[in-house]
């Protein structure tokens, strides 16, 4: 609904609201004055240049299109002093309106005087509006009462149904920590800031003019090389709305479920070509796109891998519910539902590609988006990554704001990445020269205090960090019992995994000489506290032994997705021995299934012994009368199966003659030689 319609429902009249400076850039003339000044009209009834309909004097005749929008501009500080219209209801303004013949209007920074006849015309217009205002006061009160009745009816409907329409988050002085900005979801926005629009767009503009514009999406831009989009059977529905949150879930129709079953069969065959065949019939099947993207990435085809992820995101964004919002931070997707996991993983993989592409600001927005979908459970453990992206994007204020907001609820200081990244953000903020001196000194003091607490809580981070940065520590530090080799060996395995994950990802942020000198100063301060026997040191040691007994499942899932060698090597055996699929790594044990995969009818038991033997050699071999799996590239017809079978048998027989037949011939020759000796 437009603002003009809302104003009419509330009974507000035009011209009653106060105007702000610079809101109106034109002068109004009364119709009566225009008729009196008929001698100034151009022949043929045409108005002089610069004057449009209703006597609005403008420099550009196309400005008349937006007059209604200009009237609806927001109030600035309750006063609009830059307008030629004044409130005639005030006693002191009446005399001013009569003798005011030098009213001015502002256009940018240039002030121009208005002609006297225009001032007189505006005075008459004010008198007319005052009369109309008195006539319409009664109708305005009635409409306000009617609006209150409508609000009461809507409240009763919402209370009775229990479902509330999710709307935008209330505005506040500070943005929510999970607020996502649409313009930062597009990597071209960040690349244009670095290299310019001409370097980023290149020859895209003339090509786009010849294309039909596709559906507007925020996460990706459809490409002309993609298959023509048709609904694959993927949709989203609203489950419930409570406490200001809206819970959604993706759904698969019967056609999509059949494609999902074929995909699982293709994955079990361990053959990527089977997934390619499936995508030829279902080009926007999300799990197939994710799995094939991993296969392309392992083969060093990064461009194709990224293109497949973008196609998966486009398929899921086209299925969004009309009320699902990417930016509100109030929409939730339950990770326990397998249909929702594809969206999480597609966003995560796209975020990794954006970071490697050199777009950390865009990757940070994707990280906030993933975290906002389920911030309490955090199924992909994005809190282990968001600090790294904020530092890379040089968005130090956001990292500090997130730490201040969630420290009391989440104990972020107990994570090694936050314990070291937040003081680093304070220190880097104190290095900026465009801030006041007192803010710089305050940030430096806060950084020193937090880094000393981090070193006291996690002493096993220092020596590996210096080794990553190729810095040789002082002998007094390396030989000290607190920071020595025992500190790294004595920490629990779960803590060692978190430390390895943080150092493998963020160690290069500490390589600056200024950062290293600041770290050295605080290490010496911590050593003095340890030597003095501060009881806080023993409290931190006992806390490490209690808190880091075993890592939760979402941290293991994050480590697998991160593919950091040092962290993956520290995974426990019960995780490494499991089969991990790229489209669903470590599914939660309490999965909520909306449909079940049908059992496969095995035809192996019906075949003969020879058929079983050949099937063991060629799993996709089918004898006459059997139907191969649909959608699988290895399902061969009879002629192809016989041809491959002949080749396999020929190779097997060749090996048999070479290895097995040569041995008995030698034995018979030796026996004949021995027999000849005995007979002689």
Image (spheres, helix red, strand yellow):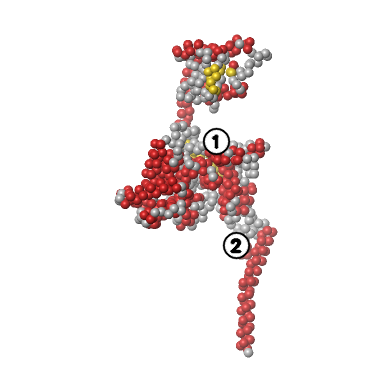
Q: Residues within 10 Å of mark 2 (few under 14, many from 20)?
A: few
606 relative to 252, above or below:
below
Q: Quadrant of the N terminus?
A: top right
Q: Residue at x 54, y 17 (%)?
A: 113
Q: Earlier in the sequence, mark 2 or mark 1?
A: 1
Structural crowding at the residue carrying mark 1, measured as other residues with C-alpha within 10 Å and reported as few (<14), some (14–19) or many (≥20): few
Residue found at the very far right of the displayed protein:
639
SS label for mark 1: loop
Front residue of 633 and 106: 106
Image quarter of residue 107: top right
Q: Residue at x 67, y 57 (%)?
A: 637
Residue 359 drawn at (x, y percent): 53, 43
Residue position for label 1: 322
Q: Residue at x 61, y 79 (%)?
A: 667
Q: Disc number at residue 26?
A: none
Residue linked to disc 2: 616
- Check the image and name the residue furthest to the bottom: 680
């Amino acid at each position: 609904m437009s603002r003009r319609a809302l104003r009419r429902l509330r009974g507000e009249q035009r011209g009653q609201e106060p105007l702000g400076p610079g809101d109106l850039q034109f002068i109004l003339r009364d119709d009566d004055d225009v008729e009196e000044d008929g001698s100034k009209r151009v022949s043929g009834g045409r108005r002089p240049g610069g004057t449009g309909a209703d006597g609005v004097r403008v420099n550009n005749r196309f400005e008349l299109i937006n007059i209604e929008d200009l009237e609806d501009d927001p109030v600035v500080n309750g006063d609009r002093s830059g307008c030629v219209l004044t409130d005639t209801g005030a006693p002191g303004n009446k005399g001013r309106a009569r003798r005011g013949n030098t009213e001015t209007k502002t256009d940018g920074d240039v002030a121009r005087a208005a002609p006297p006849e225009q001032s007189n015309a505006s005075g008459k217009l004010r008198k007319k509006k005052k009369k109309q205002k008195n006539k319409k006061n009664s109708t305005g009160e009635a409409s306000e009462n009617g609006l209150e009745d409508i609000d009461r009816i809507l409240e009763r409907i919402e209370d009775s149904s229990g479902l509330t329409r999710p709307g935008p988050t209330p505005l506040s002085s500070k943005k929510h920590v999970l607020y996502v900005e649409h313009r930062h979801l597009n990597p071209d926005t960040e690349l244009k800031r670095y290299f310019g629009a001409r370097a980023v767009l290149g020859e895209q503009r003339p090509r786009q003019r010849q294309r039909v514009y596709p559906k507007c999406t925020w996460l990706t831009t459809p490409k002309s090389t993609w298959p023509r989009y048709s609904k694959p059977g993927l949709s989203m529905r609203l489950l419930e709305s409570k406490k200001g949150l809206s819970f959604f879930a993706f759904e698969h129709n019967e056609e999509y479920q059949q494609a999902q079953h074929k995909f699982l069969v293709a994955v079990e065959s361990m053959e990527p070509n089977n997934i390619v065949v499936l995508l030829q019939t279902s080009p926007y099947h999300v799990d197939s796109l994710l799995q094939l993207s991993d296969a392309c990435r392992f083969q060093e085809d990064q461009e194709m891998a990224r293109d497949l992820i973008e196609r998966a995101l486009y398929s899921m964004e086209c299925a969004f519910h009309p009320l699902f919002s990417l930016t509100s931070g109030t929409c939730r997707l339950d990770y326990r539902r397998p249909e929702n996991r594809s969206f999480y993983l597609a966003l995560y993989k796209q975020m990794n590609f954006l970071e490697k592409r050199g777009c950390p600001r865009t990757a940070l927005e994707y990280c906030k988006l993933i975290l906002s979908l389920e911030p309490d459970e955090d199924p992909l453990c994005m809190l282990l990554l968001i600090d790294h992206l904020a530092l890379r994007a040089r968005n130090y204020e956001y990292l500090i704001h997130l730490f201040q907001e969630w420290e009391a609820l989440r104990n972020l200081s107990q994570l090694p990445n936050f314990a070291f990244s937040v003081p680093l953000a304070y220190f880097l903020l104190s290095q900026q020269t465009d801030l006041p001196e007192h803010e710089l000194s305050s940030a430096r003091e806060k950084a020193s205090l937090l880094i000393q607490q981090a070193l006291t809580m996690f002493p096993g981070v220092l020596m590996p960090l210096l080794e990553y940065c190729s810095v040789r520590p002082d002998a007094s530090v390396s030989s000290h019992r607190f920071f020595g080799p025992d500190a790294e060996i004595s920490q629990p395995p779960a803590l060692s995994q978190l430390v390895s994950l943080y150092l493998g990802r963020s160690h290069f942020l500490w390589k600056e000489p200024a950062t290293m000198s600041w770290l050295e100063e605080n290490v010496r301060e911590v050593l003095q506290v340890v030597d003095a026997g501060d009881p806080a040191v023993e409290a931190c040691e006992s806390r490490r032994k209690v808190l880091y007994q075993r890592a939760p499942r979402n941290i293991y899932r994050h480590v697998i997705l991160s593919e950091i060698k040092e962290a993956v090597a520290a995974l426990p055996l019960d995780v490494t021995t499991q089969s991990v699929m790229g489209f669903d790594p470590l599914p939660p044990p309490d999965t909520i299934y909306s449909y079940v995969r049908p059992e496969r009818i095995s035809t192996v038991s019906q075949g003969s012994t020879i058929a079983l033997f050949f099937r063991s050699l060629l799993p996709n071999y089918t004898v006459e009368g059997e139907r191969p799996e649909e959608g699988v590239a290895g399902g061969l017809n009879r002629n192809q199966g016989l041809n491959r079978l002949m080749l396999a048998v020929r190779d097997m027989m060749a090996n048999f003659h070479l290895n097995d037949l040569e041995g008995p011939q030698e034995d018979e020759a030796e026996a004949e030689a021995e027999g000849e000796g005995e007979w002689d």
